[in-house]
Amino acid sequence: MKEENIVSLRNISVDFDGDPILTGLDLDIRDKEFVTLLGPSGCGKTTTLRTIGGFITPKSGDVFFDGVRINDLPPHKRHVNTVFQRYALFPHLNVFENVEFGLKLQKLPEHERRQRVQEMLELVNLSGFEHRNIDQLSGGQQQRVAIARALVNRPRVLLLDEPLGALDLKLRKEMQIELKRMQQSLEITFVYVTHDQEEALTMSDTVVVMNDGDILQVGTPQDIYNEPKNAFVADFIGESNIVDGVMYEDFLVEFAGRKFECVDKGFGSLERVDVVIRPEDLKIVDAKTAPLTGVVESVIFKGVHYEMIVDAHGYKWMVHSTACEEPGTFVGMEVRPFDIHIMHKMEVEG
Amino acid sequence: MKWLSKSYVGVVMTFLYAPIIVLIVFSFNQSKSRGAWTGFTLDWYRQLFHNETILQSLMNTLVIAVVSSVIATLLGTLAAIGIVNMKRWQRNLVMNITYMPIINPEIVVGVSLMLLFVWIKSMGVAVEFGFVTLVLAHITFNVPYVILNVMPKLRQMDTSLYEAAQDLGCNPRQAFFKVVVPEILPGIISGFLMSFTYSLDDFIISYFVSGPTSQTLPITIYSMTRRKVSPEINALSAIIFVVVLVVLLAVNIHDAHKERESRMKARARA
Amino acid sequence: MKSKSAAVPYLIWMVIFIVVPLVLVAYYAVTTPEGQFTISYISQVGEYTAVLMRSIWLALIATVICLFIAYPLAFIISRRSGNGQRTMIMLIMLPMWMNFLLRTYAWMTILEKNGLINRFLSNFGIGPLEMINTQGAVVLGMIYNYLPFMILPLYSVMTKIPNSLIEAAQDLGCNTKKILTKVLIPLTIPGISSGIIMVFIPSVSTFIISRMLGGGGNLLVGDLIELQFLGNAYNPNLGAAISLVLMVLILLCMSITNQFGDEEKGELLK
């Protein structure tokens, strides 16, 4: 089943004061999906979002909305709305007036405006706050007003620029769940920008990992986590051990001075590769029979597990384990073939 | 220490207010002489309100202040918006020139504008020293104050507010009037008020660009002080003092009220 | 909002009413009435060195005295509660809102030969003292008119210094004198320098105070300029030359003073 693309970016290039931010970016966003643009700051994710919103005119390339080229359409004529990073609520208007703002511009009759604003405030759990001033709201409440103000216009696509960045952890978790719920119940497309990989994995249908103005990988959260395409993605999505290796033949890789069985194939013979192993995939076992051995260098208690650094002849491995080993203990480590991820070396340094 | 600082404040305040109190007291003095008290009278106030020159120049002053500060506010607000969007070197250049009328001694500003009008006249353009030159001069020294008041508000404003307005369906013009103007309004208002008061109060620059047909109140006051004895000035001073006192008190009470309100809000949020 | 073009009307205004007039001052200063280039007017300014030095000297005395009066006062005010501060600042600004001609006129009443002080002293058989038409009277007029310009910038930097900072200095072993030299003065340099500028510039260029309180004998550079444009000595070219010298002098002073202070001219000049 092929779903329809609501937004397509084709070969987009954007400069800022002569510095290239995006160079030839291609991206398709499917209708009714929760898509997250994920990457470190300065990777071009916000620029991509602003290109869709119409706040940036690309130097070259085309923006399509529902199959129609909209390069020259100003922001106020696009069927998208934005939740801005620091909310950008109008301080001179109260909650009701903020949410009503877009409807007034559409010249809707008053009773309809009132009804839609009420509905929307209900959706974001702010009924009864209509006449509050913006500066009387907490950060989380302001966030909800910003969402209501955008959604009340019934956009086909909602753009969210790091909307939860200013909230504390607990509130952030709650809002993640709520945003996902809203997206599903309203059945519209969300394009969400964040640098928080956990947020991306929790909410998204599709994650787009970006770095240096390039898209590195597009996939489901599971794909991105389990099968990162290169060391940068692996490192950015959760913590990883990344070591140099050499591919001997299909299903056999050498790293840390030993050959390991693996499940990857199709690499050149003796090709130098990145080997990625998640800390939770390394098991502490009896040193006598283990393929990897080393000395525990440090232990930190992380709540659910212990995070240990194990020094194995110069390779420092990060291991997550529920059992605790004293620093200085000589331990063995084991990894299952399908937990060894082999990646082509990246041309660019991450 | 407490009594020392209290009496120090008292001495300075006496220094600041004694002359004004003297002026006011002698505005009720029967004798024309400024030195001795001879009895109570309201004559000087009566004469003041029948003095055509003073009333006419008061009228001129008000008209000039209103016209020049309104134009200066429009010009300065637009200027501030443009300047904020300039490149750094352009902005620095424009701002340095903008500071000139503030930094330069008023007498130099007055002289330079007088030379400008003389020069324009010598080119055959009919400019009469008077109302027009006064308004032009007042706009010139008022615009910088408007710019200096509006610019910080523009800088403080979250630029995404303007984008948010567009995002919600405003064209750029609507976005400007519905969102940007309300945001910078406090700056515009304080710029306007500053312009208005400076314009009312200005003597030196007006002195160089006024003509016989159009005198402002400060210029009339000046010519009255040249005639050695004229107790009407005292009466005028007393009236101005009371007006200023009332205005300042109102502003202060308003401010105090607002501050209390925002403190309450902060408490409510916490 | 992205458009610089909003500033265009102002930029045109700025060129016509700020840049061109200053160019005209320079032009008049170096040309004869017939339009020939000459430096004779500039060199003629040298003949008035005595007047120039007197202006600088009197303005300097007034500025220093203002600083000494204002510094403790501003500190005392800055340690008051919010409401107390507001009231005190209002009291200091109130006289400033009265036209300075009236304020200066008030001192005439007090200082003149049969003025208040001399009348009072005559009760004890003293006097009459020569107070008006002296340099002392001119300096007094400067101090009286411009003292608030020294207090306000000092107050605005001092009010940002928390009490805990002074307590910390005491805790670390500073005595009163050391608190002043090691903590307070270094922290208030920006206020000091802008206060100096704001008192010195109007003082050095005044012509009203010297005329009203100084009589004919204490000509200042401002009087000199005024005489060339509106007085009997009518000679705009010489007037422009003196203005130019004054302007350069003041810009030099400012750049020196700014070396010590912050670049917050905008904020402090408001």
Image (tube, coloured by chain):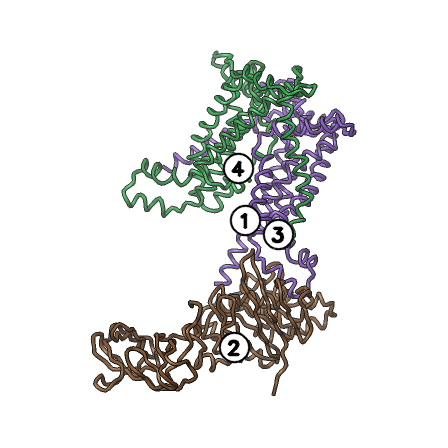
Going by the image, does B94 lie left or right of B211? left
Asked if the residue under mark 2 is in contact with the one under mark 4, i.e. CB atoms within 8 Å, the reply is no
> Which residue corresponds to mark 3?
B184
Q: Amino acid at mark 1?
A: Ala
> Which residue corresponds to mark 4?
C91
Q: Amino acid at mark 3?
A: Ile
Asked if the residue under mark 3 is in contact with the one under mark 4, i.e. CB atoms within 8 Å, the reply is no
Nearer to us in this view, A29 or C125:
A29
Q: Residue at x 38, y 81 (%)?
A: A269
Q: Secondary structure at mark 1?
A: helix
- Tell me the subunit letter for badge 4: C
Question: Badge 2, how many Cα within 10 Å: few under 14, some, many 20+?
Answer: many
> Which residue corresponds to mark 2?
A218
Nearer to us in this view, A11 or C228:
A11
Gap between marks 3 and 1 measured at Cα: 21 Å
Task: Report the mark closest to the observer, 1 or 2.
Answer: 2
- Chain identity for the colour brown used in the image: A
Gap between marks 3 and 2 measured at Cα: 43 Å
Q: Earlier in the sequence, mark 3 or mark 1?
A: 3
Asked if the residue under mark 2 is in contact with the one under mark 1, i.e. CB atoms within 8 Å, the reply is no
Asked if the residue under mark 1 is in contact with the one under mark 3, i.e. CB atoms within 8 Å, the reply is no
Q: Would you identify the image quadrant in which residue C69 lies?
A: top left
- Tell me the subunit letter for badge 3: B
Q: Where, quadrant-wise, is the C terminus of chain C in this rendering?
A: top right
Gap between marks 1 and 2 measured at Cα: 57 Å
> Which residue corresponds to mark 1?
B256
Q: Residue at x 67, y 22 (%)?
A: B224
Q: Amino acid at mark 2?
A: Val
Q: Amino acid at mark 4?
A: Leu
